[in-house]
């Protein structure tokens, strides 16, 4: 990996930590101001206010304990890198205490803004079996 790809891998590590701490502020430090967040089974969220609201709702609803496995980080243009990953762990629903496995595949697009790599676009989908 080149220096930019290593820097993006570090951002992904910080993202993992922020998710596991349910820390919206830490998550938002990693996003670009005009980011687009595309969670599975939900409409996309555009810009910091909408993205922040989405993470606040997630963290109020569930507790994640996940580990990311970075499959690839590729610099595609000056100031642009994509990353493909998968994550696995557990999820716990705050309202009921119920929990279970959590597993996703993710695609991130990063943009270098003022010398820092930021999440510009992010989408994911579950890799868990369909629940009946």
Image: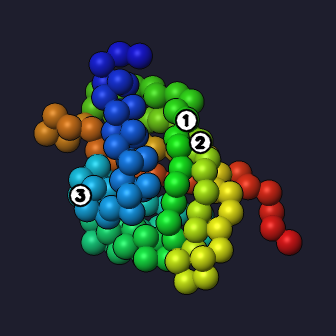
Mark 2 is surrounded, within 10 Å at the Cα level, by few (under 14), some (14 to 19) or many (20 or more) other residues, namely: some
Q: Quadrant of the N terminus?
A: top left
Disc 2 vs disc 1: Cβ atoms closer than 8 Å? yes
Q: In this view, does 26 lie above or below 56?
A: above
Indicate which disc, 3 or 2, sits on the residue closer to the N terminus: 3
Considering depth in this image, is 3 or 110 the residue closer to the camera?
3
Q: Is residue 97 above or below residue 119?
A: below
In terms of secondary structure, where does tag 3 sit? strand
Mark 1 is surrounded, within 10 Å at the Cα level, by few (under 14), some (14 to 19) or many (20 or more) other residues, namely: some
Q: Position of residue 122 (x, y in %)?
A: 45, 52
Q: Name the residue under label 1.
A: 69
Which residue is at a point 32% across and 64% down the rendered structure image?
A: 24
Q: Name the residue under label 2.
A: 86
Q: CA separation, marks 2 and 1?
A: 5 Å
Q: Mark 3 points at which residue?
A: 33
Considering depth in this image, is 58 or 97 the residue closer to the camera?
97
Q: In which quarter of the image is the C terminus?
A: bottom right
Residue 36 visible? no
Q: CA separation, marks 3 and 1?
A: 26 Å
Indicate which disc, 2 or 1, sits on the residue closer to the N terminus: 1
Q: Where is residue 55 in the image (x, y as percent from the top left)?
A: 40, 68
Count every numbered label the image shows and give the total: 3
Residue 42, disc: none
């Amino acid at each position: 990996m080149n220096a930019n790809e290593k820097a993006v891998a570090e951002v992904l590590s910080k993202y993992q930590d922020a998710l596991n701490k349910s820390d919206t502020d830490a998550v938002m430090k990693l996003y670009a101001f005009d980011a687009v967040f595309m969670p599975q089974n939900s409409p996309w969220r555009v810009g910091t206010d909408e993205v922040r609201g989405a993470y606040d709702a997630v963290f109020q609803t569930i507790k994640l304990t996940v580990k990311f496995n970075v499959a690839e980080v590729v610099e595609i243009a000056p100031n642009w890198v994509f990353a493909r990953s998968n994550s696995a762990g557990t999820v716990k629903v705050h309202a009921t205490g119920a929990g279970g496995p959590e597993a996703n595949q993710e695609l991130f697009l990063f943009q270098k803004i003022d010398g820092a790599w930021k999440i510009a676009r992010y989408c994911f989908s579950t890799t868990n079996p369909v629940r009946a």
